[in-house]
Image (cartoon, helix red, strand yellow):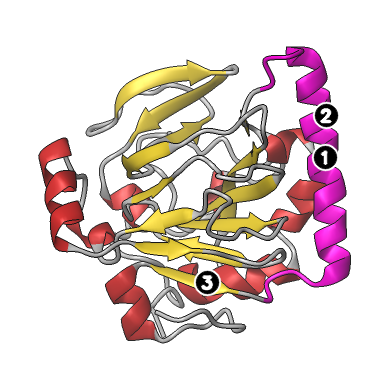
Amino acid sequence: MSPTSSPRPDGAAWERDGWVLAVDALDAVTLDVVRQAADVLIEAQSADAGSGAPPGHRGVLHRSPVLAVIARSASLRALVEPILGPRWRPVRGLLFDKTPAANWKVPWHQDRVIAVRERRPAPGYRAWSRKEGVWHVQPPPEVPANMLAVRLHLDDCGPDSGPLRVLPGSHTAGYLDPDAIRAWRARVPEVTLCAPAGAAILFRPLLLHASAAALRPTHRRVLHLEYAALPLPGGLEFAHLPGISESEFGDSTSASPPAGAAFW
């Protein structure tokens, strides 16, 4: 799938490949606002951590009112609503910055874990863990299959910057074990997603993706946002933004995405 300046890619290609690059996701003014808010978080956490500054920052939508507003802004609505429908909500925010001091690689994997407000028993929910005071859990695969990840690039990300690499179509196969991941790698050519500053990469969380360490690390700041439109079962709730109630999601008895979530 080729990059596009529109948040509405070809529907058949989106369903087949599970990713799209929107090169004009943020205008220059919004991009500058997001950069400043991100730098506040990075500098604060680096000061707390000293020389062992972490490569990633969790809970950024709770820690930054500015980024919380951006996550629900018209710019993000234009990207997310055509895919998830009118009941889309941000449910998690992460911030990454590859630098000479924090330059890492990520092996091939799927994003299987969601953040929830509290631990409750629910069928198919497993591998509970608590990170920075927030419960995380692996839900049944249909949950991430109906979610959307949006990576907002705050800096130019070229081939030497440790860009995202994906295996198109792998989001359709449910949860993949190590043998299945190796089979996908052997069968499907990977795609490297370089992106200019202000671009957004949209992808399904179950899409196999990876990244190498940057060859020339400077800054490669990425705001990673996750969105959902369907509620969780059994009283479970996403650890989403303050002020968003579970009632704002669609009918929890629905087995398919809400009206408007069909692909184009």
Q: Label 1, on which residue?
A: 39
**Residue under the image location 31 percent in, 52 percent down:** 208
Neighbourhood count class around disc 2 (C-alpha, 10 Å): few under 14, some 14–19, many 20 upward? few
Task: Pick whichever, 123 or 44, lies toward us.
Answer: 44
In reply to whether residue 213 is colored magenta, the answer given is: no
Name the disc covering residue 88, or none: none
Amino acid marked by disc 2? Glu
Q: Can residue 242 be seen in this view?
A: no
* Element marked by disc 1: helix
User: Which residues fall within the magenta stretch?
Assistant: 24-53
In three-dimensional space, the C-alpha distance between marks 3 and 1, rounded to whole angstroms, equals 24 Å
- In this rendering, would 229 be left or right of 146? right
Q: Which of marks 3 and 1 is nearer the N terminus?
A: 3
Q: Label 3, on which residue?
A: 21
Residue 251: percent from left, percent from top = 41, 58
Quarter containing the C terminus = bottom left
Neighbourhood count class around disc 3 (C-alpha, 10 Å): few under 14, some 14–19, many 20 upward? many
Q: Label 2, on which residue?
A: 43
In three-dimensional space, the C-alpha distance between marks 1 and 2, rounded to whole angstroms, equals 6 Å
Quarter containing the N terminus = bottom left
Extreme residue toward the front, this view: 216
Amino acid marked by disc 1? Asp
Q: In the picture shown, does residue 50 fall above or below 181?
A: above
Q: In which quarter of the image is residue 119?
A: top left
- In this rendering, would 112 be left or right of 102? left
Task: Pick whichever, 112 or 239, lies toward us.
Answer: 112
**Residue under the image location 51 percent in, 79 percent down:** 3
Task: Pick whichever, 172 or 98, lies toward us.
Answer: 98
Cβ atoms under marks 3 and 2 closer than 8 Å: no
Cβ atoms under marks 1 and 2 closer than 8 Å: yes
Amino acid marked by disc 3? Leu
Q: Can residue 194 be seen in this view?
A: yes
